[in-house]
Amino acid sequence: MSLLPGLARFGRFLGQIVWSTVSNPLPVGRALEEAHRIGVNSLPILLVVSVFVGTNLSVQGASAFSTIHAERYVGMFVALAGVREMAPIMVASMVAAKAGTEMASQIAVMRIQEQIDALEVMAIDPYWFLITPRLLGILLVLPALTMISIFTLVVSAYGVAITQLGLDGHTFLEQATATTHAMDLVYCAVKAFVFGLVICVLSCYHGFTSGAGASGVGRATNAAVVMAAVSCAILNYLLSELLFG
Amino acid sequence: MHLFDRLAALGRFGLFTTRVIRRLITPPWEIEEISRQVWLLCSRCALPVLATTTPLGMVMALQGLVIFSIFEAEQYLSPLISVATFRELSPVLASVLVAAQGGSSFAAELGAMRIHEEIDATEVMAIDPIRIHVVPRLAAILLACPLLNLLGSLGGIGGGFVSAVWIKGHPGTLYWSELWSMTGGMDLIGGQIKALVFGAIIGLVATYEGFFASGGAPGVGRAVNRTVVTSATTFIVVNYFLTSALFGVPH
Amino acid sequence: MSPDRTSVSRTLVPDPVAIRIEELRKSFGDLVVLDGVSLDILQGKTTAILGPSGCGKSVLLKHIVGLLRPDSGHVWIDGIDMAIATPEEKLQVRKRFGMLFQHGALFEDLTAGENIAFPLRYHTRLTAAQRRARAQEVLELVEMPELHDRPTSALSGGQRKRVALARAIVLEPQVVLFDEPNSGLDPMTSTTIDDLILRMKERLGITFVVITHDIVQAVRISDWVGMLWQGRLVAYAPLPVFLHSEHPIVRRFLSRTL
Ligand SMILES: Nc1ncnc2c1ncn2[C@@H]1O[C@H](COP(=O)(O)OP(=O)(O)O)[C@@H](O)[C@H]1O
Ligand SMILES: [Mg+2]
């Protein structure tokens, strides 16, 4: 298969991003713009998803723990499963779906309309111009989005626990805060940082290497989101093993 | 204005859905095209589904061992993994991947057809584009989702085994002997019901976005983007209600 | 190099060479697109490259600016071989070049004026107001002064071409490359674009390379004409000589004129 040449090409792409980023002035303004755009675009769906993942975790935890009569541990379950695992990977998936596909399709369109060639001919480094700001932007904003999502998730899980499930709110919070250490939040931010890197690089790569025409753009966008989701899931395990194992 | 646009889009989606469903439940069916799409979908999605549910199963075992070692109740590890995988992990995650891979490829293909005026050409030839392009894809996703969900469940349980037993030294015989102790038929059926509902959401959203794509190649990109975002968000919301209805704690 | 072509260019040409292409070969998989193309593009002259569509004209142009790397052969510009040039060398060459892409390649999320000011922002120290003024000046040169604040997505095909042309010349390049400036345009707009090129030729004294399949345009604007056919340059001569060429392919192309 064409696995090895593909990997080599991807490796060269990565090297080019690093080189273009360090050998040009940092595009601070445009990076902030990207961060703002990614944040504002992804926040609404993230809030909705966080609320419902939180409520779902509570219901799930209660139903699992009720078989062993340990409902008082639902708070701990939400903290462990929700904060450490669900929130970072969920934020990553939603941002891959929203911002990642957008990056891939925008860059793919620029590729097929020869706008990237035009940049090169105008002696402007397309990696620096197109990828560096997106990369810096997503790295800035993803940890923040993850923290917001963690907060939303725990609050909604708490809400369902005391209303729909009739659990004791005090115990829930005690359990949840006792299980969540400050370090856990730092680890979540680390995860978010890595996921942001992966999403951005993969999306931009598929955009840069897009095939011709409307179907090329569609395929690039499609491949970007699948590769990003799969890579994040696998990296999530490795990071959890490394950070929490 | 904005609100009006949204309502109009919602109405158009409703109309589209009824048009599709009416054709889905009445013959003639394009059996050959449906089986081709099922095969295509399964072969495209199998690897991504396995490659996400397996590491998530591994993570579950990792964190599960943390909880259960506190209570010294490690015999509950594999039942927890099994219940969580069948009820939640596999249906949701497999569907997210089917949306990302299958749904977005539907949107991309139909969108490209629309942009290249192939759909208009089909209509001019007095052939119903919904029957030949949309219905087979929807039928295929309804058939493929339960299969992929099953595959995802295997991945989750296998991943849990690898992480707990091979990496963390949890006793393997305990893992297998306790695996089914808390999992009932309702968990399997409930998981499959979820997979079917999510599949229907993906299929309808993807074909709708693709079928009504506009604005050249950027339009196709937007259709793919919206398919993934809309269907994933929708079924995470729907999932909460399904979980409550199917597996909720009896008071 | 085919012997008759070299003899022509050596005897008739006193002008310095701006771009020297030597034995350029390029294949995509099994498809041989350029099969040993050599030509000298002369300083200050307008060179048209004719050829049927799909014969590799755009591919040739992309080799000149170093967007594609040939399988073998050279593209010499100012002593730099674009075939093997380092990124820095390519930048150095490209800063003196302007290029009009076949479909414009304008940035869709900018206005027409912002597209034109774009190279200024990255290659000059002009302030925003100065860039605006310069963009407006060039828009007037291409006779589209009213387009400055128009979103790119709202431009017609002919307007796009002209805005892209304005962007290509905004830095006052020494060499301007055109990829099918007339494709997809009606005869009236095509004529306007030809006139524009002619006028720029007088005023700016630039080297133009015009890729086209439009023989009428080639006749109207060029000093030298080349004919690309099945991966080879089958003819290359000053316009009057070219028009009387006996080469069968050239005759077939010319017979379409009137
Ligand atoms: N990047 C590429 N990959 C593969 N084939 C290409 C590529 N670019 C051009 N070609 C092929 O090379 C041939 C010449 O293309 P081109 O130079 O665009 O033609 P034209 O003379 O019409 O400008 C065509 O057959 C085209 O399909
Ligand atoms: Mg061309």
Image: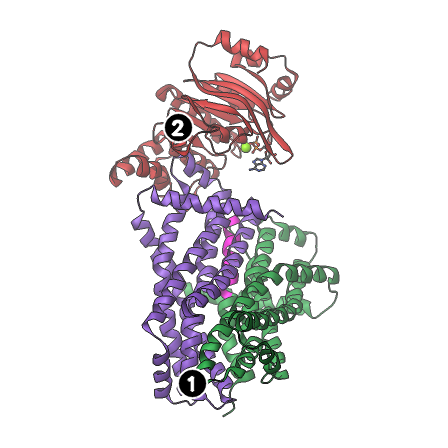
* Quarter of the rendering occupied by the N terminus of chain B: bottom left
Please state the horizontal and vertical placement of residue B82, each as a whole percent of the image: 57, 78
- Circle 1 crowding by C-alpha within 10 Å: few under 14, some 14–19, many from 20: many
Q: Nearer the viewer, mark 1 or mark 2?
A: 1
Please state the horizontal and vertical placement of residue A24, each as a whole percent of the image: 33, 42
Callout count: 2
Q: CA distance from mark 1 to mark 2?
A: 68 Å
The red-tinted chain is C
Chain B colour in the picture: green
> What residue sits right under mark 2 in the picture?
C93
Looking at the image, residue B61 lies above or below residue C69: below
Q: Which chain letter goes with mark 1?
A: A
> Which SS does the magenta portion mostly show?
helix
The residue positioned 58% from the left and 51% from the top of the image is: B112
Q: Secondary structure at mark 2?
A: helix
Nearer-the-camera pick, A11 or C162: A11
B225 magenta-colored: yes
Q: Which chain letter goes with mark 2?
A: C
B70 magenta-colored: no
Kindly tell me whether residue B211 is visible in this rendering.
Answer: no
What's the magenta region? Answer: B216-230
> What residue sits right under mark 1 in the picture?
A73
* Three-letter code, disc 2: Val
Q: Quadrant of residue C53?
A: top right
Please state the horizontal and vertical placement of residue A133, each as a whole percent of the image: 36, 50
